[in-house]
Image: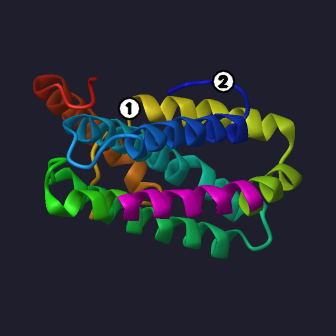
Amino acid sequence: MGHGGDVIAELTTDHREVEEIFGKIEGMPSGDSRRKTLAEQAIIELVRHSVAEESYLYPAVREQMADGDMMADKELEDHAAAERTMKELEGCEADDPRFDALMLKLMTEIREHIADEETNLFPQLRSACTPEMLNELGDKVRTAKKTAPTRPHPSAPDKPPANKLLAPGVGLVDRLRDMMTGRGKP
């Protein structure tokens, strides 16, 4: 959730945590109900991570980098595709014939997105921003993740200011639903 460090360290740690969950899912047999629980945990983390990036990282990319608009737009497209997949997954149990295909699709989308961010976007951002800016962005991302939604909302706005205004309220509703249903708990 909140790991500390600059924005790149924070988001990279999130990436490793999601990859660890994916590895656990891949290590279980098809149809195992624990795969659904792990998928829910991954979705919770991915949605919170995405909302934080959309609220703070991508606006900074647009502001600080020469090709920032193009890069941020590409990242938002990646998020939108993954969010649609997560929404479909939300309606599947582990023994649903669609579950494995959707899980594979999500893992592929997320792994490609992570590779792109870590290989291209993060190094360029580190060059374009001061360490102080990156630390401040890290603090903002950590704060945003605390109140972010935990469920995919594909039709929700993904750019400021609308996303920053709506995310905390939607996040509160999501967390209440999660608490009442036990979603995301091992």
Q: Is residue 53 visible?
A: yes
Q: Is residue 154 visible?
A: no
Relative image position of residue 64 (x, y in whole percent): 77, 59
Report the front residue among 103 and 3.
103
- Residue occupying image coordinates x 62% and y 35%: 13
Kindly identify which residue carries mark 1. 147
Residues drawn in magenta = 104-119
Query: Residue 10 vs residue 150: left or right?
Result: right
- Count of all numbered marks drawn on residues in the image: 2
- Say which element carries label 2: loop
- When the figure is inspected, residue 22 is found, relative to residue 182, above or below; the finding is below
Mark toward the viewer: 2 or 1? 2
Kindly identify which residue carries mark 2. 4
Report the front residue among 47 and 53.
47
Q: Quadrant of residue 10?
A: top right
Query: Residue 10 vs residue 82: left or right?
Result: right
- Residue occupying image coordinates x 41% and y 41%: 27
